[in-house]
Image (spheres, helix red, strand yellow):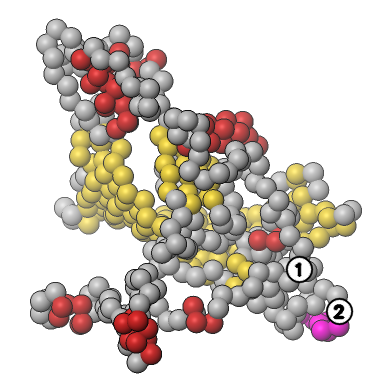
Amino acid sequence: MNDGGREIRQAALTGRYRKQIEDIGTLDLRILGTAYTKLTYVNAGSPLNGKCQNGTVTQQAYPSMSCYQINTRATFTSGPLTLGMQSRYIPKGKFGTTYVGPQDDGYSPTLPNSINDNRVKAVTYVDVNASYRIIDNGRRMVEVFGAIKNAFNTNLPVAPANNIGTNANLYDVLGRTFRVGMVRVPMVMYEPGTVPAGVVNTGRIRNLDYAPTFLDLAGVEKPAQFEGVSAWPLITCKVADKDWKAPDFTYEYYWEWAYPMTPGTFAIQRDNLKYIQYYGVYDTDELYDLARDPDEMHNLIDDPAYLQAKVDLRKALYQQLANRDGRHAIPDGQRNAIGSVRRNRAGTGAAPFPDSWLVEPNRVDRKDNVLPDSVAKQRAHDEGKAFVRFPVLGSPEANENAGIKD
């Protein structure tokens, strides 16, 4: 692909194995390997090489990509149950092709483009998911689903030159995240003479729409502060499901001091498009076409074909996050672009975390920093003890506390 001053060439290899395991179910294994044979771009009139440049968040103005990537997917299906696991391997690469580190030829600490480490380590991410079909009668399907992205909470590779996380286009900058939900939950209504009998209506409504619908049915005007809309015209088939304008789904999560690693998260879904933005964290927006990408693996936020959709959803999300007085819980203006995210390649970068924050995982005192500070807690810490012990689930101590015998 040649895009103005950017040229990308790649080669891909795929494989698949499928096996029926007696009467238990079907196992489907897939692998996709992608190698980038060429990735060049022009910066200030000079051609530069972006191949094998894993990059940092300061380099997102220019293309950067690992030498190759390997994606594997395993899916097991047994009747209405589906279990899946996907892994993504990103090999080690250079921090930047314009830098020179001790691992590179011609390195000298006196060079203006020298850094103390020009390598980013390899990373493997594992995602898991499960779904169960509650209804599947040929005309409609209802299923519950759940997914865990970055199931092992794999840490970001750190670029030692400036102590910041690496390229957000390659690496997971949020850590382990969970998605749980239910799609197409059936709503059954019965009222002879008003609600048509035996009709399957595919129109979609939200929980917010229940109260306005019931008030409409009772002949009561909806209070001004209600956000939902009445679905009574849809239910009575006065409006065909194909003509029903399904209301947007909005999601809002506000940052909590007790769990600062999870940023404020706001999202909106309109039809099959889902847009996500984060507040108070250095991260890219997300946009997914759920009809083509139900697992949300391919971010379309910078895809020119979805530009207008991105603009429209940003505006709609901001409007719908406001309360009835038009005010927002966070005094934030409407986002209309990604913002000034570019940074000096040779800059000093962010400061490292305090040393006392850097500990081994799964410590029994891991909840102490959430519990209120007190003299008793300080005394326990002075004695080298956990204030409140939280053993890891499944450990001998946890099993003993729960009365579970090995």
The residue to which callout 1 is attached is: 347
Name the one closer to the observer, 132 or 377: 377
Classify residue 234 as left or right of residue 154: left
Q: Residue at x 44, y 62 (%)?
A: 257
Q: Looking at the image, is 362 positioned above or below residue 144?
A: below
Query: Which of 365 and 173 lies nearest the eye of the viewer?
Result: 365
Which range of residues does the magenta coloring cover? 104-111
Quarter where residue 366 is shown: bottom left
Q: Are marks 1 and 2 in contact (CB under 8 Å)?
A: no
Closer to the chain start, of discs 1 and 2, is 2
Outermost residue toward the right in this view: 45
Identity of the residue drawn at 60% across and 40% down: 333
Quarter of the figure with the C terminus = bottom left
Does the segment drawn in magenta span residue 371?
A: no
Residue 286, compared with residue 200, is above or below; it is below
Question: What residue type is disc 2 on?
Answer: Leu
User: Could you say where residue 137 lies in the image, as x and y percent from the top left?
Assistant: 20, 30
Question: Could you give the CA–CA distance between mark 1 and mark 2, rounded to whole angstroms?
Answer: 15 Å
Residue at 33% from the left image edge and 86% from the top image edge: 380
* Label 1: element kind: loop
* In the displayed structure image, the side of residue 386 where residue 331 appears, left or right: right
The image's mark for residue 111 is 2
